[in-house]
Image (cartoon, rainbow, N blue to C red):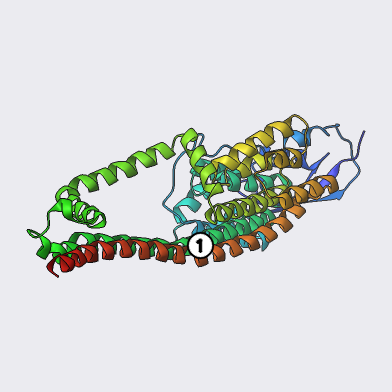
């Protein structure tokens, strides 16, 4: 006979808002017994007590957090909630739980207020938890904004009895994700606005101003006698004025076709591969993906998920199918007994620094901690890449604008010079 353990728990849900004790041979069995009673523990601490026991040492592996595929069997979807609002919700819930509030009370506290965007979602979570379901199952049944990563973090927190701490980690991860997205958006917003303005300016000059300037030449020089740049500009102007409806329709059809093609995995894989090889932009995209990869996987492992499970979940956060394909291959080789670092290094798609950090983390047994340090490094690189991108792109667009404007000016001046020579 082996020793039983007395576990002290803080609980929420229908079965027990408050604290209590349960005796079991191990943590996994204690969690299972509590759930059978309808108790949802938000913390679980053990104290040793002598008693009889059944040997269920293998049970803990079966009760570890499973990989949840988001979207399968979801009962409903909620009102639109931004990622920033969702991160705030998770942080507030984590704070309430760590303050000692039972889970249902914490949920009701966070969801209080008629104008609270989270109120309908919280109502669903409270109802499900009060009927005996785990918070992770309730979140998965609601759907967005709960994604695969967040649901599995919550499940890991419930399984380990550290729900408050794990949800704090989840909120930090979500907040960093929002921060990076805002940085990338701010980096691309100004160049995109500049590009749109440049395009509009060129269209106005070519279709309105240039024809008026060249109008006096009509009847004095035939189209064939005009210089090549002038003929090109006049042809474009006439084409836009006559077939503007066809051009707009073609652009709309092209956008629609492009969006549909990008949904095809093979096309998206090619596009993502090309983007990674694009100067400046490719480095920015890779740094963003690698920083997100390191931060997410490190958080999942620190929360108690197995490395392979964390790797599979992290794949969906990369945002690039080329890198996702590499991670798929890494998962397959890890399942066959290899380390994570070796197939990542062989792929040559991830920075050597990340590969070395993962290798050291695997050998030392501190993979989660090492990935967190790697995330700090690559988030710094991301900020640097964003600065390079925002510094380099406007001058490039300015050069393009100068070339276009110079070509238009040449198209206007050349026939005037020829006319002057002819008159002279």
* Residue at the front extreme of this rendering: 424
The reply, left or right, for residue 331 in relation to residue 87 is right
The reply, left or right, for residue 424 in relation to residue 66 is left
Q: Position of residue 79 (x, y in %)?
A: 41, 51
Q: Position of residue 62 (x, y in %)?
A: 73, 33
Q: Residue at the spot x=60%, y=46% of the render?
A: 149
> Picture quarter containing residue 344?
top right
* Residue at the top extreme of this rendering: 336
Dot 1 corresponds to which residue? 182
Q: Is residue 286 above or below residue 34?
A: below
Q: Residue at the spot x=20%, y=51% of the render?
A: 235
In terms of depth relative to the viewer, which is nearer, 196 or 294?
196
- Secondary element under disc 1, as helix, strand or loop, is helix
Q: Is residue 79 above or below residue 84?
A: above
The answer to whether one can see residue 70 in this image is yes
Q: Position of residue 393 (x, y in %)?
A: 47, 63
Q: Position of residue 222 (x, y in %)?
A: 12, 54
Which quadrant: the C terminus? bottom left
């Amino acid at each position: 006979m082996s020793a039983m353990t007395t576990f002290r728990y803080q609980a929420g849900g229908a079965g027990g808002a408050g604290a209590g004790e349960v005796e079991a041979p191990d943590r996994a069995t204690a969690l299972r017994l509590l759930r059978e009673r309808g108790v949802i523990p938000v913390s679980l601490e053990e104290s040793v007590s002598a008693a009889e026991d059944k040997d269920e040492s293998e049970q803990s592996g079966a009760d570890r957090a499973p990989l949840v595929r988001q979207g399968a069997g979801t009962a409903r979807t909620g009102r639109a909630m931004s990622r920033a609002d969702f991160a705030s919700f998770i942080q507030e819930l984590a704070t309430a739980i760590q303050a000692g509030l039972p889970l249902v009370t914490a949920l009701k506290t966070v969801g209080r207020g008629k104008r609270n965007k989270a109120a309908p979602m919280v109502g669903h979570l409270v109802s499900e938890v009060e009927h005996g379901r785990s918070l992770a199952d309730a979140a998965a049944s609601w759907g967005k904004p709960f994604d695969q990563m967040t649901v599995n973090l919550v499940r890991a927190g419930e399984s380990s009895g550290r729900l408050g701490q794990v949800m704090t980690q989840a909120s930090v991860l979500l907040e960093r994700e929002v921060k990076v997205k805002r940085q990338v958006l701010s980096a691309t917003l100004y160049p995109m606005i500049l590009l749109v303005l440049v395009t509009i300016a060129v269209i106005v000059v070519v279709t309105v101003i240039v024809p008026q300037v060249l109008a006096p030449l009509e009847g004095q020089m035939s189209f064939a006698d005009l210089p090549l740049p002038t003929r090109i500009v006049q042809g474009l102007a006439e084409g836009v004025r006559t077939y503007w409806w066809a051009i707009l329709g073609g652009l709309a059809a092209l956008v629609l076709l492009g969006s549909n093609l990008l949904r095809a995995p093979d096309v998206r894989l090619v596009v993502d591969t090309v983007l990674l090889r694009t100067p400046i932009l490719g480095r920015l995209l890779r740094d963003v993906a690698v920083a997100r990869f390191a931060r997410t996987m490190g958080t999942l492992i620190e929360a108690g998920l197995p490395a392979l499970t964390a790797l599979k979940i992290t794949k969906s956060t990369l945002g690039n199918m080329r890198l996702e394909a590499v991670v798929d291959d890494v998962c397959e080789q890890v399942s066959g007994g290899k380390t994570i670092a070796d197939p990542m290094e062989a792929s040559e798609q991830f920075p050597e620094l990340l590969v070395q950090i993962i290798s050291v983390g695997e050998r030392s047994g501190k993979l989660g901690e090492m990935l967190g340090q790697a995330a700090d490094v690559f988030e710094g690189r991301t900020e640097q890449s964003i600065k390079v991108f925002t510094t380099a792109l406007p001058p490039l667009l300015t050069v393009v604008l100068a070339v276009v404007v110079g070509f238009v000016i040449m198209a206007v001046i050349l026939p005037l010079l020829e006319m002057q020579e002819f008159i002279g």
